Image (cartoon, grey):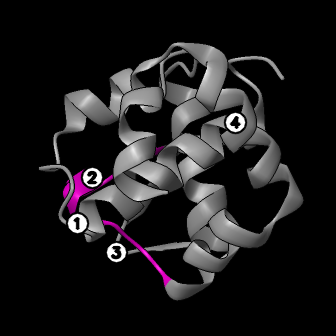
Amino acid sequence: MAKDDFNYIEFKILAYYYAWLKGKVVFDDQVLREVTKGADDPYFYKVLKSLSDRSYLEGLTFINAWGNEFFVGNDLSDGAITAEGYRYLKENSSMKGALEYAKTAGELISTLLPKIF
C-alpha cells in the first residue's frame, strides 16, 4: 500500500477524527495535514469530500472552486466522524489493511494508533 493510496488517506483521516472524538488528541489542522502527508491539497479535499458524501464524516462544508476541485469552507475542526464512519474504520477490510500498514509505516499516524485501537 502506498503512502498516498486513497484507502490509506481515508484511514488516516478517519483515525484522526476518531482519536479526537475519544479525547486522545487536541484537534489541530496542521497535525491532520501532517498525518495525511502524501496527499496534496486537491487530493486531500477530494478524499474528505468522498468521506463526507458517504456519511463517514459530518459537519464539513465543501465549496466547488472549479471543475472537480473543492475546498472546505469551514474549519476542519467542525467535522466529526459519524457512527457509520466508525463502523467503516473498524470493520472494512481495506481499513484493516491500512491499519496493518500504518503499524509499520513509521509515520505520525503510527504514534496515534495505541491511543485509539
Q: Label 4: how many residues lie within 10 Å, few (<14), some (14-19) or many (20+)? A: many
Residue furthest toward the bottom?
83
Looking at the picture, how far across and down is residue 99, in whole percent? 67, 42
In this rendering, is residue 81 above or below 47? below
In this rendering, is residue 16 above or below 4? below
Label 4 to label 3, Cα distance in Å? Answer: 22 Å
Q: Label 3: how many residues lie within 10 Å, few (<14), some (14-19) or many (20+)? A: some
Q: Residue type at mark 2: give it.
A: Leu
Give the residues drawn in magenta, as a range.
Answer: 71-82
Residue labelled with disc 4: 8
**Camera-nearest residue between 63 and 87:** 87
What's the mark number on residue 76? 2
Q: Are marks 1 and 2 in contact (CB under 8 Å)?
A: yes
| Helix, strand or loop status at disc 3 | loop
**Camera-nearest residue between 23 and 85:** 23
- From the image, state whether disc 4 or disc 3 is nearer to you: 4
Q: Are marks 3 and 1 in contact (CB under 8 Å)?
A: yes
Residue occupying the point 18% across, 64% down? 23
What's the mark number on residue 78? 1
Residue furthest toward the front?
114
Label 2 to label 3, Cα distance in Å? Answer: 9 Å
Q: Earlier in the sequence, mark 2 or mark 3?
A: 3
Q: Is residue 29 visible?
A: yes
Looking at the picture, how far across and down is residue 78, in whole percent? 23, 66
Label 2 to label 4, Cα distance in Å? Answer: 19 Å
Q: Quadrant of residue 73?
A: bottom left
Q: Residue type at mark 3: give it.
A: Gly
6 relative position to 109: left or right: right
Residue occupying the point 77% across, 52% down? 96
Q: Label 2: how many residues lie within 10 Å, few (<14), some (14-19) or many (20+)? A: some
Q: Quadrant of residue 7?
A: top right
46 relative position to 77: left or right: right
